[in-house]
Amino acid sequence: MLTSLGVDRRTEAVYRAMLTHPDEGVADLCRRLGMSEGDIRGSFDRLSELALVRPSSEEHGRLRAVSPDIGMEILLTRQQAEIAAQQHRVETSRAAAAQLISEYADLRPSVAEPGVEHLVGLDRVRERLILLQREVREEVMIFSPGGEQTQENLEASRPLDESLLGRGVRMRTVYLDSVRNSPHTVAYAEWLSGLGRQARTAPTLPVRLIIADHSTAVIPVDSDDTAAGAVVLTGQGALAALCALFESVWETAKPFGEAAPRDERGLTDTESTALKLLADGFTDEAIAKRLGVSHRTARRVATGLMERLGARSRFEAGVGAVRRGWLR
Protein backbone atom coordinates (compact mmCIF):
# COMPACT_ATOMS: atom_id res chain seq x y z
CA MET A 1 0.00 0.00 0.00
CA LEU A 2 2.86 2.39 0.81
CA THR A 3 5.26 1.15 -1.87
CA SER A 4 4.49 4.19 -4.04
CA LEU A 5 5.79 6.32 -1.19
CA GLY A 6 9.08 4.41 -0.93
CA VAL A 7 8.12 1.97 1.86
CA ASP A 8 8.63 -1.72 1.06
CA ARG A 9 6.11 -4.30 2.27
CA ARG A 10 8.25 -5.69 5.10
CA THR A 11 8.98 -2.21 6.48
CA GLU A 12 5.30 -1.28 6.18
CA ALA A 13 4.30 -4.41 8.14
CA VAL A 14 6.70 -3.46 10.97
CA TYR A 15 5.40 0.13 10.98
CA ARG A 16 1.78 -1.02 11.18
CA ALA A 17 2.60 -3.47 14.01
CA MET A 18 4.35 -0.69 15.96
CA LEU A 19 1.26 1.52 15.57
CA THR A 20 -1.19 -1.14 16.79
CA HIS A 21 1.11 -2.61 19.49
CA PRO A 22 3.26 0.32 20.69
CA ASP A 23 4.51 -1.51 23.81
CA GLU A 24 6.00 -4.49 22.00
CA GLY A 25 9.76 -4.80 21.59
CA VAL A 26 11.93 -6.47 19.00
CA ALA A 27 11.33 -10.02 20.33
CA ASP A 28 7.55 -9.50 20.35
CA LEU A 29 7.57 -8.14 16.80
CA CYS A 30 9.65 -11.11 15.65
CA ARG A 31 7.03 -13.53 16.97
CA ARG A 32 4.07 -11.51 15.70
CA LEU A 33 5.37 -10.97 12.18
CA GLY A 34 7.39 -14.16 11.78
CA MET A 35 10.55 -12.24 10.97
CA SER A 36 14.10 -12.57 12.15
CA GLU A 37 15.67 -10.03 14.47
CA GLY A 38 17.87 -8.88 11.59
CA ASP A 39 14.80 -8.20 9.42
CA ILE A 40 13.13 -6.23 12.22
CA ARG A 41 16.19 -4.10 12.90
CA GLY A 42 16.69 -3.55 9.17
CA SER A 43 13.13 -2.25 8.99
CA PHE A 44 13.85 0.00 11.99
CA ASP A 45 16.78 1.51 10.05
CA ARG A 46 14.58 2.15 7.00
CA LEU A 47 11.80 3.68 9.14
CA SER A 48 14.39 5.95 10.78
CA GLU A 49 15.61 7.11 7.33
CA LEU A 50 12.01 7.95 6.43
CA ALA A 51 11.43 9.69 9.80
CA LEU A 52 8.52 7.31 10.56
CA VAL A 53 9.92 6.33 13.98
CA ARG A 54 11.51 8.38 16.77
CA PRO A 55 13.26 7.55 20.06
CA SER A 56 10.86 7.13 22.97
CA SER A 57 10.92 9.94 25.53
CA GLU A 58 9.78 7.54 28.25
CA GLU A 59 11.83 4.39 27.62
CA HIS A 60 15.50 4.73 26.78
CA GLY A 61 16.58 2.73 23.71
CA ARG A 62 13.02 2.09 22.41
CA LEU A 63 11.58 3.46 19.18
CA ARG A 64 8.05 4.76 18.77
CA ALA A 65 6.12 4.88 15.50
CA VAL A 66 5.15 8.36 14.33
CA SER A 67 1.38 8.77 13.96
CA PRO A 68 0.10 8.20 10.38
CA ASP A 69 -1.16 11.76 9.89
CA ILE A 70 2.33 13.13 10.56
CA GLY A 71 4.17 10.21 8.94
CA MET A 72 2.23 10.35 5.66
CA GLU A 73 2.77 14.09 5.44
CA ILE A 74 6.51 13.51 5.82
CA LEU A 75 6.50 10.87 3.06
CA LEU A 76 4.46 13.03 0.67
CA THR A 77 6.72 16.03 1.26
CA ARG A 78 9.78 13.85 0.59
CA GLN A 79 8.23 12.49 -2.60
CA GLN A 80 7.31 15.97 -3.84
CA ALA A 81 10.92 17.06 -3.29
CA GLU A 82 12.18 14.05 -5.28
CA ILE A 83 9.74 14.80 -8.13
CA ALA A 84 10.85 18.44 -8.18
CA ALA A 85 14.49 17.33 -8.32
CA GLN A 86 13.72 14.90 -11.15
CA GLN A 87 11.86 17.61 -13.05
CA HIS A 88 14.85 19.89 -12.64
CA ARG A 89 17.12 17.19 -14.07
CA VAL A 90 14.76 16.72 -17.02
CA GLU A 91 14.70 20.45 -17.76
CA THR A 92 18.48 20.62 -17.49
CA SER A 93 18.80 17.68 -19.91
CA ARG A 94 16.28 19.27 -22.28
CA ALA A 95 18.28 22.50 -22.33
CA ALA A 96 21.50 20.59 -22.97
CA ALA A 97 19.84 18.65 -25.82
CA ALA A 98 18.51 21.88 -27.36
CA GLN A 99 21.99 23.39 -27.18
CA LEU A 100 23.53 20.34 -28.86
CA ILE A 101 20.90 20.38 -31.63
CA SER A 102 21.52 24.09 -32.18
CA GLU A 103 25.28 23.59 -32.39
CA TYR A 104 24.84 20.68 -34.80
CA ALA A 105 22.50 22.76 -36.99
CA ASP A 106 25.20 25.43 -37.24
CA LEU A 107 27.63 22.81 -38.53
CA ARG A 108 25.32 21.64 -41.32
CA PRO A 109 26.20 22.89 -44.78
CA SER A 110 23.86 25.57 -46.03
CA VAL A 111 21.28 24.48 -48.56
CA ALA A 112 22.32 25.49 -52.04
CA GLU A 113 18.78 26.24 -53.15
CA PRO A 114 15.40 26.43 -51.42
CA GLY A 115 13.43 23.21 -51.27
CA VAL A 116 16.50 21.00 -51.76
CA GLU A 117 18.48 19.20 -49.07
CA HIS A 118 21.51 17.08 -49.96
CA LEU A 119 22.27 14.02 -47.82
CA VAL A 120 25.78 12.64 -48.17
CA GLY A 121 26.41 9.06 -47.07
CA LEU A 122 24.19 6.16 -46.07
CA ASP A 123 24.10 7.11 -42.37
CA ARG A 124 22.68 10.57 -43.11
CA VAL A 125 20.10 9.06 -45.44
CA ARG A 126 18.95 6.53 -42.84
CA GLU A 127 18.74 9.18 -40.11
CA ARG A 128 16.63 11.41 -42.36
CA LEU A 129 14.29 8.56 -43.30
CA ILE A 130 13.74 7.65 -39.63
CA LEU A 131 12.93 11.28 -38.85
CA LEU A 132 10.60 11.46 -41.84
CA GLN A 133 8.74 8.33 -40.73
CA ARG A 134 8.23 9.83 -37.27
CA GLU A 135 6.85 13.06 -38.71
CA VAL A 136 4.52 11.65 -41.39
CA ARG A 137 0.83 11.96 -40.52
CA GLU A 138 -1.30 11.00 -43.52
CA GLU A 139 0.32 9.04 -46.36
CA VAL A 140 3.56 7.50 -47.60
CA MET A 141 4.01 6.64 -51.30
CA ILE A 142 6.96 4.44 -52.30
CA PHE A 143 8.61 3.21 -55.49
CA SER A 144 10.76 0.17 -54.62
CA PRO A 145 12.70 -0.78 -57.77
CA GLY A 146 15.27 -2.98 -56.02
CA GLY A 147 13.64 -6.26 -56.95
CA GLU A 148 13.72 -9.09 -54.42
CA GLN A 149 14.32 -7.94 -50.84
CA THR A 150 16.58 -9.87 -48.49
CA GLN A 151 15.06 -11.47 -45.42
CA GLU A 152 17.29 -9.29 -43.20
CA ASN A 153 16.14 -6.04 -44.83
CA LEU A 154 12.50 -7.02 -44.51
CA GLU A 155 12.88 -7.87 -40.83
CA ALA A 156 14.63 -4.56 -40.22
CA SER A 157 11.72 -2.72 -41.87
CA ARG A 158 9.02 -4.59 -39.94
CA PRO A 159 8.84 -2.43 -36.75
CA LEU A 160 8.90 0.86 -38.69
CA ASP A 161 6.21 -0.25 -41.15
CA GLU A 162 4.06 -1.64 -38.33
CA SER A 163 4.41 1.63 -36.41
CA LEU A 164 3.35 3.70 -39.42
CA LEU A 165 0.26 1.63 -40.15
CA GLY A 166 -0.59 1.46 -36.46
CA ARG A 167 -0.77 5.26 -36.42
CA GLY A 168 -3.32 5.21 -39.23
CA VAL A 169 -0.89 6.38 -41.92
CA ARG A 170 -1.93 5.33 -45.43
CA MET A 171 0.86 3.43 -47.17
CA ARG A 172 1.09 2.64 -50.89
CA THR A 173 4.06 0.79 -52.40
CA VAL A 174 4.85 -0.15 -55.99
CA TYR A 175 7.30 -3.03 -56.40
CA LEU A 176 8.74 -4.59 -59.52
CA ASP A 177 6.82 -7.55 -60.96
CA SER A 178 9.86 -9.71 -60.23
CA VAL A 179 9.21 -9.70 -56.47
CA ARG A 180 6.24 -11.99 -57.12
CA ASN A 181 8.81 -14.77 -57.51
CA SER A 182 10.27 -14.17 -54.04
CA PRO A 183 8.37 -16.18 -51.38
CA HIS A 184 9.61 -14.18 -48.39
CA THR A 185 8.92 -10.85 -50.11
CA VAL A 186 5.41 -12.02 -50.99
CA ALA A 187 4.86 -13.18 -47.40
CA TYR A 188 6.01 -9.82 -46.07
CA ALA A 189 3.75 -7.94 -48.48
CA GLU A 190 0.77 -10.08 -47.47
CA TRP A 191 1.53 -9.42 -43.78
CA LEU A 192 1.57 -5.68 -44.45
CA SER A 193 -1.64 -5.92 -46.47
CA GLY A 194 -3.28 -7.45 -43.42
CA LEU A 195 -2.36 -4.27 -41.54
CA GLY A 196 -3.85 -2.05 -44.25
CA ARG A 197 -0.88 -1.38 -46.55
CA GLN A 198 -1.68 -1.31 -50.30
CA ALA A 199 0.84 -2.77 -52.74
CA ARG A 200 1.04 -3.13 -56.51
CA THR A 201 3.69 -4.20 -59.00
CA ALA A 202 4.93 -2.82 -62.32
CA PRO A 203 7.37 -4.19 -64.92
CA THR A 204 9.80 -1.30 -64.40
CA LEU A 205 10.02 1.75 -62.16
CA PRO A 206 11.59 5.09 -63.09
CA VAL A 207 13.39 5.77 -59.81
CA ARG A 208 13.58 4.81 -56.15
CA LEU A 209 11.23 7.23 -54.42
CA ILE A 210 9.62 8.00 -51.06
CA ILE A 211 6.98 10.73 -50.74
CA ALA A 212 5.62 11.71 -47.31
CA ASP A 213 2.34 13.63 -46.94
CA HIS A 214 2.66 15.03 -50.49
CA SER A 215 5.13 17.52 -49.02
CA THR A 216 8.53 15.82 -48.82
CA ALA A 217 10.22 13.48 -51.30
CA VAL A 218 13.47 11.53 -51.01
CA ILE A 219 15.26 10.23 -54.11
CA PRO A 220 18.78 8.73 -54.40
CA VAL A 221 21.60 10.64 -56.01
CA ASP A 222 22.60 7.45 -57.84
CA SER A 223 19.93 4.78 -58.40
CA ASP A 224 22.64 2.13 -58.69
CA ASP A 225 24.37 3.17 -55.45
CA THR A 226 21.94 4.18 -52.69
CA ALA A 227 24.87 4.60 -50.28
CA ALA A 228 26.12 7.56 -52.33
CA GLY A 229 23.50 9.85 -50.83
CA ALA A 230 20.10 11.27 -51.55
CA VAL A 231 18.21 14.48 -52.20
CA VAL A 232 15.27 15.67 -50.10
CA LEU A 233 12.81 17.79 -52.10
CA THR A 234 10.20 20.03 -50.52
CA GLY A 235 9.55 22.53 -53.31
CA GLN A 236 5.92 22.69 -54.41
CA GLY A 237 6.66 22.30 -58.12
CA ALA A 238 8.92 19.26 -57.69
CA LEU A 239 6.47 17.58 -55.31
CA ALA A 240 3.54 18.12 -57.66
CA ALA A 241 5.46 16.46 -60.51
CA LEU A 242 6.63 13.51 -58.38
CA CYS A 243 3.16 12.92 -56.93
CA ALA A 244 1.70 12.95 -60.46
CA LEU A 245 4.37 10.45 -61.55
CA PHE A 246 3.51 8.14 -58.67
CA GLU A 247 -0.23 8.29 -59.36
CA SER A 248 0.35 7.57 -63.04
CA VAL A 249 2.40 4.45 -62.29
CA TRP A 250 0.00 3.39 -59.50
CA GLU A 251 -2.99 3.49 -61.85
CA THR A 252 -1.40 1.08 -64.34
CA ALA A 253 0.29 -1.18 -61.77
CA LYS A 254 -1.29 -4.52 -60.84
CA PRO A 255 -2.58 -5.23 -57.30
CA PHE A 256 -0.13 -7.50 -55.51
CA GLY A 257 -2.57 -10.30 -54.83
CA GLU A 258 -3.52 -10.75 -58.48
CA ALA A 259 -1.68 -13.09 -60.83
CA ALA A 260 0.24 -11.34 -63.59
CA PRO A 261 -2.19 -11.19 -66.57
CA ARG A 262 -1.30 -11.73 -70.22
CA ASP A 263 -2.33 -9.37 -72.99
CA GLU A 264 -3.73 -10.18 -76.44
CA ARG A 265 -0.21 -11.14 -77.57
CA GLY A 266 0.05 -13.68 -74.77
CA LEU A 267 2.73 -11.61 -73.02
CA THR A 268 2.95 -10.55 -69.42
CA ASP A 269 3.91 -6.95 -68.62
CA THR A 270 7.40 -8.15 -67.72
CA GLU A 271 7.78 -9.98 -71.05
CA SER A 272 6.43 -6.98 -72.94
CA THR A 273 8.90 -4.65 -71.26
CA ALA A 274 11.75 -7.10 -71.82
CA LEU A 275 10.84 -7.27 -75.51
CA LYS A 276 11.07 -3.48 -75.87
CA LEU A 277 14.43 -3.47 -74.11
CA LEU A 278 15.62 -6.37 -76.24
CA ALA A 279 14.65 -4.57 -79.45
CA ASP A 280 16.39 -1.40 -78.23
CA GLY A 281 19.65 -3.34 -77.93
CA PHE A 282 19.86 -3.65 -74.15
CA THR A 283 22.13 -6.40 -72.85
CA ASP A 284 20.89 -9.18 -70.58
CA GLU A 285 22.63 -7.43 -67.68
CA ALA A 286 20.90 -4.12 -68.41
CA ILE A 287 17.53 -5.84 -68.81
CA ALA A 288 18.05 -7.65 -65.51
CA LYS A 289 18.73 -4.36 -63.73
CA ARG A 290 15.66 -2.66 -65.21
CA LEU A 291 13.39 -5.59 -64.33
CA GLY A 292 14.95 -6.24 -60.93
CA VAL A 293 15.73 -9.86 -61.73
CA SER A 294 18.89 -11.96 -61.85
CA HIS A 295 21.08 -12.06 -64.95
CA ARG A 296 20.05 -15.69 -65.47
CA THR A 297 16.34 -14.82 -65.32
CA ALA A 298 16.76 -11.97 -67.79
CA ARG A 299 18.58 -14.30 -70.20
CA ARG A 300 15.83 -16.91 -69.83
CA VAL A 301 13.11 -14.33 -70.60
CA ALA A 302 15.04 -13.00 -73.60
CA THR A 303 15.69 -16.50 -74.93
CA GLY A 304 12.03 -17.44 -74.52
CA LEU A 305 10.91 -14.38 -76.49
CA MET A 306 13.40 -15.08 -79.27
CA GLU A 307 12.21 -18.68 -79.52
CA ARG A 308 8.56 -17.60 -79.76
CA LEU A 309 9.53 -15.16 -82.55
CA GLY A 310 11.70 -17.72 -84.33
CA ALA A 311 14.64 -15.31 -84.14
CA ARG A 312 18.34 -16.19 -83.96
CA SER A 313 19.49 -12.70 -82.98
CA ARG A 314 18.17 -9.73 -81.10
CA PHE A 315 17.87 -7.79 -84.36
CA GLU A 316 15.75 -10.56 -85.88
CA ALA A 317 13.64 -10.58 -82.71
CA GLY A 318 12.98 -6.86 -83.12
CA VAL A 319 12.04 -7.25 -86.78
CA GLY A 320 9.82 -10.24 -86.02
CA ALA A 321 8.08 -8.41 -83.19
CA VAL A 322 7.30 -5.47 -85.48
CA ARG A 323 5.94 -7.79 -88.21
CA ARG A 324 3.64 -9.50 -85.69
CA GLY A 325 2.47 -6.18 -84.34
CA TRP A 326 4.09 -6.80 -80.98
CA LEU A 327 6.15 -3.63 -81.39
CA ARG A 328 5.63 -0.45 -83.34
Image (tube, rainbow, N blue to C red):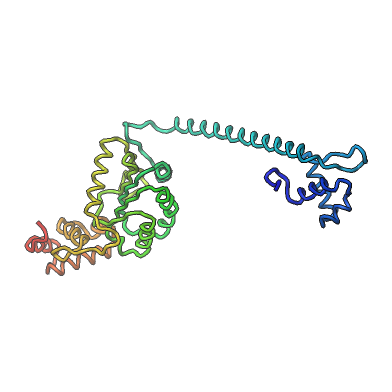
Q: Is residue 244 above or below residue 195?
A: above
Foreground residue, 112 or 198? Answer: 198
Tell how many labels.
Answer: 0
207 to the left or right of 37: left
| Quarter-of-image position of residue 232 | top left
307 to the left or right of 139: left
x then y, percent, for residue 139: 34, 46
Q: Is residue 96 above or below residue 1?
A: above
x then y, percent, for residue 283: 21, 58
x then y, percent, for residue 269: 20, 60
Foreground residue, 104 or 203? Answer: 203
Q: Is residue 54 above or below residue 189?
A: above
Quadrant that contains the C terminus: bottom left
36 to the left or right of 2: right
x then y, percent, for residue 162: 42, 53
Foreground residue, 231 or 189? Answer: 189
